[in-house]
Amino acid sequence: MAQLAGVSPATVSFVLNQTAGQTISAETRERVMQAVAELGYRPNRAAQGFHRGTSATIGFVNHDVDFGEFAAAAIKGAHEASLRHGNLLLLVNTGGSNRQAEHLIADLLDRRTDAFIFAAVGTRAVTVPEAALQAPTVLLNCYTADDRAPAILPDEERGGREATRAMLGLGHRRFAYLTGKPAQWSTKARLRGFRGALREAALDPDDQVVLSGNYHADSGYDLTRELLRRGPLPTAILCGNDRMAVGTLLALFEAGIRVPEDVSVMGYDDQFQLAAEVRPALSTVRLPYDLMGQLAAERLVEPAMAGSARTLVHCPVLLRGSTAPPTRG
């Protein structure tokens, strides 16, 4: 390779290993890389890592029961960002067990993993094994109570506020909000956003109906049946997530109530192969797990990404067929 490039073997080594402190001209570097391409050379990553003390790997630790669709989106974003920086993503799943998390992280460290993305589904406080915090670690969709590691989180309060603003913009003034589990971080944040948007519009949040559910379709169905019993219906129903919204649509359909002609319905999550495919297509707020995964991986390798302990990622509103201006007061 050195002969083909017309340089010394040491120069080839400096270029391929990106050796610090060595000044190599752009023209020489180009000749070396051209020789690499012509010879089909593949560097020995293990040998490079031994000399540098790194392995060019990031451990993605999914701290949940299994890999669901939201974890898959986050993994895709982190994988693509890692590849752009020459890193590979190693995936492990803890099953939600702190003990298993400790074991897997120790195993990854034994394999010279450089850094970690510690992820959860359902934004919440987590206990991160001490070993992980000795290496660069970014938390994804979770956080520690003392903010010992930077966290990438969805901006749920802004999402709840913008969803409500969108409905207000359509002309709605009478709402029901069917929340998810009351104690969850996301539920509390979205509810703050909902109430904040109402106050901005000079509406009293206490005049609106808020019922607590559990983020499942049966909960949306049951709570909507309760709304029907209470009567009269609001002109807009905001749901804790898309699954609850599907339950709401079913209850309204059974009662002969049209969506969006009689009542508008808004979900949350933009769940894959659900929100856009039901009829009417569901207006919702998108949880950008793919972007969050990307940001987590980039924060590990880009010094410019350093900043506050918690980075909040915008959750955009998507208006589809389930929402429209109200036809009644």
Image: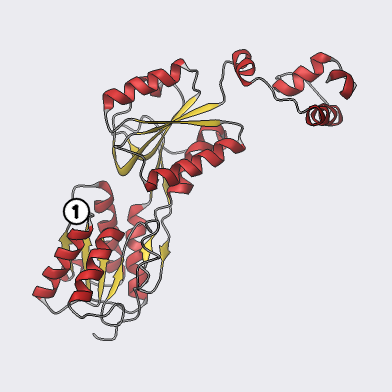
Task: Name the secondary structure under disc 1.
Answer: loop
Residue 11 visible, this angle:
yes
Horizontal placement of 184 versus 260: left or right? Answer: left
Residue depicted at 30% across the width and 72% down the height:
201
Q: Within 10 angstroms of label 1, few (less than 14), some, or many (20 or more) residues?
A: some
* Above/below status of 21 relative to 301: above
Q: Is residue 8 above or below residue 297?
A: above
Q: How many marks?
A: 1
As displayed, is residue 211 above or below residue 149? below
Q: Which residue is outermost to the left? A: 229
Image coordinates for residue 305, horizontal then vertical, percent: 53, 38
| In-front residue for pair 302/279 | 279
Which amino acid type is marked by label 1?
A: Asn
Front in this rendered view, residue 315 or 239: 239
Q: Is residue 94 above or below residue 198?
A: above
Classify residue 147 by image quadrant.
top left
Instruction: Tell me where residue 117 appears, x and y as whole percent.
Output: 43, 33
- Image coordinates of residue 268 in percent, x first then y, are 33, 59
Q: How is the image coloured?
A: secondary structure
**67 displayed left or right of 211:** right
The residue lying at 55 percent from left, 40 percent from top is: 81
Name the spot of residue 294 as percent of width and height, x first. 50, 43
The residue wearing badge 1 is: 214
At 45% from the left and 15% from the top, the residue drawn is 110
Q: Nearer the viewer, residue 144 or 244?
A: 244
Figure quadrant of the C terminus = bottom left
